[in-house]
Image (cartoon, rainbow, N blue to C red):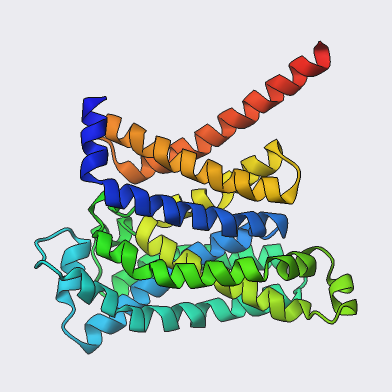
Amino acid sequence: MERIAAYFTQYQPIVLLSLIYFAAMAYVGLFLILRRASLYGMVLSQVAQVSFLFGLAVASGLGDHEHVYAMINRSAAAPGSEWHFLEIDLYVFPATLLFMLPLIVSAVRGVRNKETLLLQGMIFFLAAYPLINKAFGGSDVILAKAYFTEILYTPPAMFVHYLPLVGVLLFTLIVLQRRILLTGFDPIQARLLGISPQLYDAIFYFISGIMLSVAVRILGAYVSMAALVVPGYVALSLVRHLRSVILATLALAIIFTASGFVLAFRLDNWPTEPLLTTHTVLFGALLLVARWLVVRLCRRY
């Protein structure tokens, strides 16, 4: 326990900020689940990785950004160089919007066999990432860290840098929550009320894409996907009313993340991000099994 407490003290800012990002992604993921669009989130995570690598390659080609590659490879970087890493947002976010646009259009227009189209997109971006990495001279370390970042070694300044953007996007999503839910569940009723389903669908998918792009940068792809899917899915299985589901999703996201860090600090020789991901999935599965057992016992007695 002393070792775990010492680690929490050492990494307190990163742990607390990670809770915020994990909860934010769980909130967005709940809406994706309610709209039966979880696959869209999975594809966006791959888009975020390709966009990051593409933007990084363009940035390094237009200027002296070798220090960015040094940071990703965990080489010695000068103090404060994390802010140079943030400069490539000028290249990454336009690339993200460019790659996201066809997905948003297909989701908004209700393209036939949309799930199949999204699956093809996911396969394409999964295969495109190592090819782009190879084409622009990226190392195997960069390729590996597309999926699992060094979250405990990510400068807290990077977490803080994206908080205003995440806050604005979350606030917008909360304000438009009812309309987004209505257009997702009953577009005909929405049209009768003068609400455009296409407009609010586009807003929702745009917000989801940008938030997921940021989360992949901070948390890593697999941790972000676990945050996107597991808390909301478990919450929907445990409670029924929407407000309770939202609160349960946020609570579970915090519990999963905090307990995951406890496990990671206990097994300090193991990689943190894979532990967080597998812990989240297994913890969620354990809760579902426990609920099933309770229901069976209640029915029997």
Q: Residue at x 23, y 38 (%)?
A: 7
In this rendered view, identify the residue nearer to me: 170 or 102.
170
Residue 124, how many percent across, how many down? Answer: 52, 68
Q: Residue at x 9, y 61 (%)?
A: 76
Left or right: 218 in relation to 183 = left
Residue 187, how many percent across, how many down? Answer: 83, 71
Left or right: 71 in relation to 115 = left
Left or right: 26 in relation to 175 = left
In this rendered view, identify the residue nearer to me: 165 or 48.
165
Choose top left, top right, bottom left or bottom right for residue 195.
bottom right
Residue 137, how many percent across, how many down? Answer: 24, 72
251, above or below 195, in the image: above
Q: Which residue appears farthest toward the top when viewing the image?
A: 301
91, above or below 77, in the image: below
232, above or below 46, in the image: above
Choose top left, top right, bottom left or bottom right for residue 127.
bottom left
Work out whether residue 146 can be spotted: yes
59, above or below 75, in the image: below
Choose top left, top right, bottom left or bottom right for residue 261.
top left
Work out whether residue 47 can be spotted: no
Left or right: 297 in relation to 255 = right
> What quarter of the picture does the C terminus occupy?
top right
Residue 20, how many percent across, how many down? Answer: 43, 55
> What quarter of the picture does the N terminus occupy?
top left
Total labels: the figure holds: 0
Q: Residue at x 75, y 46 (%)?
A: 241
